[in-house]
Image: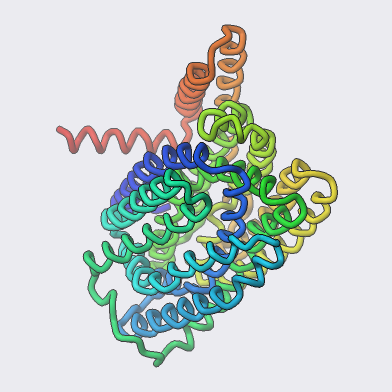
Amino acid sequence: MSKSPTVRGALAWSFAERYLSLLITVPTTMILARLLTPTQVGVYSLCAVVTNLASILRDFGVSEYLIQERELDREKLRSAFTITLLMAWGIALAILGGRFLLADWYHEPLLADLLLVLSLNFVMLPLASPTFALLNREMAFHQVFIVQVSANAANAVTSIALAWRGHGAMSLAWGPVAGIAVQVAVLVWLRPRDALLLPRLRGVGRQLRFGAMFTGSRLVESGSRNGHELIIGKVFGFTALGLFSRATGLIDLLAQTVSSAILRVATPALAADHRAGHSLVAPYAKGTAIFTGIAWPFMGGVALLSGDIIALLFGPQWHEAAPLATLLALAGLPYALTMLAPNALAATGQIRRRLSVALWYGPTHLACVGLAALWNLHAVAAVFVIGNLVQVAMYTRHLTEVLQARPRELFGPSTVSAQLALGCCAGLGLAQLASHELGLPLVPRLALCVVAGALAWLGCATLLRHPAMTEVRRALTHLRSRHA
């Protein structure tokens, strides 16, 4: 990504928000895992899949349109707000009308009550999402920091309080509703210029065309990535779904700590470079190298330490999720190479290509999951690697055409990340063997492994001159200069 101070400052705020949010969400997850059963988590996870798919329709690509549009005026903002309002409230009505059908299909009445609560999000979100998109477009991540941390804190407090009082899966539904309510309140308070305008349909044609392509690709992507939960819930039951959801949640720690912080800045930064007529090859290659330098050691560490991590974070009732987390971590390694690819295509307006990738990936992934479900849950986790390899192949083809670059130019800098991951995992593995020989209990054992892995990462990143280490040094130098 661009080397400008603005982008680095945005990344600093974005990472600060994600890590402070992590300090909220990890303890919250640890507490809820001990207050709720795998079955209760599984029931809520199924509703989350439905509402996540509905959220894509609700936004209808408006946020991405506002970020990438070259000339943004009041008329375009008004039509964007109108589209968001109509889609969100229409989906809220659809969820209310169809919630009993889902409950009957899975023979679980609680699904209808959960969806009733979650539909409130769609009533409130139109007041927040266009404003949030404008903050991202302007790279005002200091304000995004305030919004997200406040919402996460409200979500955490509400969920824990209700779970503590015995409300079970319903506590997981009311938490996000409280978070969205706080998000809307903070955004109205911040109220960037032209964020809240009267609805108007004039000039919505271009936005609808952009949104149709973007939403189609997102629906296929999200349906493919989350559709396995619908299959697991039906074939293996809600307890198995809860275990699988907890395993994927452990892998998603990477998304919560690193991916979302980078991706939130990536789209407006790449779009700004594209609007200025700059080549995106070097920013993409460097961004991918930095991301793989963090993602691959993280995935390797999860694969090695999944049992201890799950025991510490979630408690003994979740131990069956550990082998699933190991398989999912290994399956996710290839996708790190193209994590920035959807953002690069969106930033250049190539939404049709993104949809093409989704249409290849979706049926392949769900077909593999359906076949693996004939065996067991571990087979379902293992076949994730097939869909990820398909995505890498498809995105590589499109990126080379759009950015006019060879695969070696896009992914060559990431070869050093593979060496970094091997060195880091070697340090973790040696520490794990030593801790078992010494007979250390869980917390000291895990602490020793984490410290050894971190030192191995720092040492290898320094020796290999990895670009991630360069950014770390630059950030430390900047902090020291500001302190001085």
Q: What residue is at 51 percent from the left and 79 percent from the top?
A: 93
Q: What residue is at 58 percent from the left and 62 percent from the top?
A: 404
Does residue 435 appear to the left or right of 481 in the view shown?
A: right
Find the residue positioned furthest to the front: 166
Find the residue positioned furthest to the bottom: 202
The percent position of residue 367, horizontal first and vertical second, equals: 79, 59
The answer to whether residue 130 is seen in the rendering is yes
Find the residue positioned furthest to the top: 438
Q: What residue is at 44 percent from the left and 61 percent from the top?
A: 267
Residue in front for this viewpoint, 37 or 204 = 37
Q: Which quadrant would residue 473 be assigned to in this image? A: top left
Residue in front for this viewpoint, 304 or 4 = 304
The percent position of residue 8, horizontal first and vertical second, equals: 33, 48
Does residue 108 appear to the left or right of 126 in the view shown?
A: right
Which of the image's four quarters has the C terminus? Answer: top left
Q: What residue is at 51 percent from the left and 61 percent from the top?
A: 344
Count of marks, rendered view: 0
Q: Which quadrant would residue 203 be assigned to in this image? A: bottom left
How is the protein colored in the picture? rainbow
The percent position of residue 11, horizontal first and vertical second, equals: 35, 49
Does residue 420 appear to the left or right of 224 in the view shown?
A: left
Above or below residue 438? Residue 223 is below
The answer to whether residue 60 is seen in the rendering is no
Does residue 79 appear to the left or right of 187 in the view shown?
A: right
The percent position of residue 172, horizontal first and vertical second, equals: 48, 53
Above or below residue 202? Residue 213 is above
